[in-house]
Image (cartoon, helix red, strand yellow):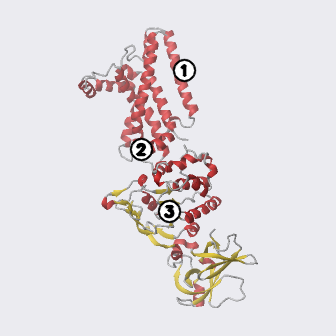
Amino acid sequence: MSQIHATFRIDRGDFRLDVDLTLPGHGVTALFGHSGSGKTTVLRAIAGLEHAPGGYFALGDVVWQDDAKGIFIPTHQRSLGYVFQEASLFEHLTVEDNLEFGRKRIPQSERRFKQSDVTELLGIGGLLNRRPASLSGGERQRVAIARALLTAPQLLLMDEPLAALDLKRKQEILPYLERLHDELSIPLIYVSHAPDEVARLADHLVLLDTGKVVASGPLTETLARADLPQAFADDAGVVIKTVVTHHEEDDLTQLDFVGGSIFVARRPETVGRRLRCRIHARDVSLALEKPVASSILNVFHGIVTAIAPTDTPGHVLVQLSLRNTPLLARITERSRKALNLHVGQPVWAQVKAVALLA
Amino acid sequence: MDANDLGAIWLTLKLASVVTILLLLFGTPIAWWLARTRSKLKGVFGAVVALPLVLPPTVLGFYLLLAMGPNGLVGKFTEWLGLGLLPFTFPGLVIASVFYSLPFMVQPLQNAFEAIGDRPLEVAATLRASPWDTFWSVVVPLAKPGFLSGAVLAFAHTVGEFGVVLMIGGNIPNKTRVVSVQIYDHVEALEYTQAHVLAACMLVFSFLVLLTLYTLNPNKVKGREQ
């Protein structure tokens, strides 16, 4: 599919943005970074809400901005959907009129989605006659997402759509976002500073720091890079894509991935379902010999591929390869010396905890 | 009430209605500009619009009289157009009243527009609404309390004007003699009963206007949102 090209430079004195990105034209791209990293500014520039002079943006061969040629398509003429961080519903309209606001402004021929399908996808069918003021934060955000979808955009942009919600509401919306990902073919650029959301939703990851792109690549590869731990600090870790293969009799579920099998507490998903697992570097310990007489079930054999310093004093980050599936382990520098770990060395990795992203 | 009194009431209502409609037409873009601009001239224009709030009406009337008179720029222009001179005519009164009541329309509207903020406009743009479309489908409904306050205040303030009318319009029955001038005439002629009736009418009218404003819009008088 067609790619997304974005080049923006903004200089506001105390804040500089300088990005040059090529992103896949499908799936979910996460723009990840701390506050002040410029991720929201990038999103606003893509939407044309912010004009970065001299910028360039193209979605496939559709150019939205090319200042060198004097092209700047105003926001309302760009085929995009935008979900803002806080509730942005029109308070003077009912939920249904909010949903129709964008849909009725696109040509009949471009209306790809039926209102009933989208309201069902987001579970808001029962809210149509309500006023935004009477909705919960989670419901408002789902309506805002549905409203953006109904314009059948070529590109969806979401600016931390879950940030203003509490944990419970987040859990309520995340499954809907996953369904968007699985059921629609619209590329989504998702701004977030929550590693969990990124690990769960993203296919492609862009790391931003003080207005610059630190890394951009497929999610699993980028998360497993040992040279970027400062971006995630204590949350450093990998995402492993697994398939549910077996429900065991002792209430464990076996998940297979290229590098082996992971056993977790029994899952509700049926055999064959795909599941993302997150393994934090801090939950992985290393041993030179295969641990025997250990209570830890998830033990993998791998080879050390990199060792890098971390922000945690006295600790290092070790990157392993389990038959080409990367894994990160955070161990103490003392242990590294004691085991005399070096690149190329075979080791056993014990995984103490696996977070299932579902 | 005699025919002169009724004529004055009719003329007053006609004047206030025309002025309110004109102020909605001209005040709205001015208020929009003041609410949205980042220009350094915002302060200057804001102050000019607010001048009638503090200026004695006679001062405003005096300058308008000069401008619209035979030697004034406006006067020369209207004569060139073949319209004659505006002082002591109903159109002259309308123009003067528009200036006089301008802040009463502009300020509630400006506050209402500012309270809406950028976000609803950005949201509308991402939903394919052009700026003009957004103004009608988002800004006007959201600023409704501001429009209501502005219209009611501008209408009531025009009904209550006296000094400017006297300077520009004088005291011509059925042409420029509004209720406030008519009351003045009655008092000068020692016709206290007639003055009482008209004064009471004005009092009740003004109270009802403000009552409507405060009950319809308890927290938003003058367009201030919550």
User: What is the CA distance from the residue labelled 2 to the residue labelled 3?
Assistant: 29 Å
Asked if both marks, 2 and 3, belong to the same chain, the answer given is no
Percent coordinates x, y for residue A114 in the rendering: 55, 54
Residue named by callout 1: B204
Tell me the kind of residue under disc 1: Val
Of circles 2 and 3, the one toward us is 3
Tell me the kind of residue under disc 3: Ile
Which quadrant of the structure image shows residue B48?
top left
Of circles 1 and 2, the one toward us is 2
Say which of B41 and A67 sits in front: A67
Above or below — where is B48 with respect to B15? below
Above or below — where is A223 with respect to B216? below
What's the residue at 49%, 60% (across, down)? A157
Residue named by callout 3: A186
Percent coordinates x, y for residue B16 in the rendering: 44, 24
Tell me the kind of residue under disc 2: Trp
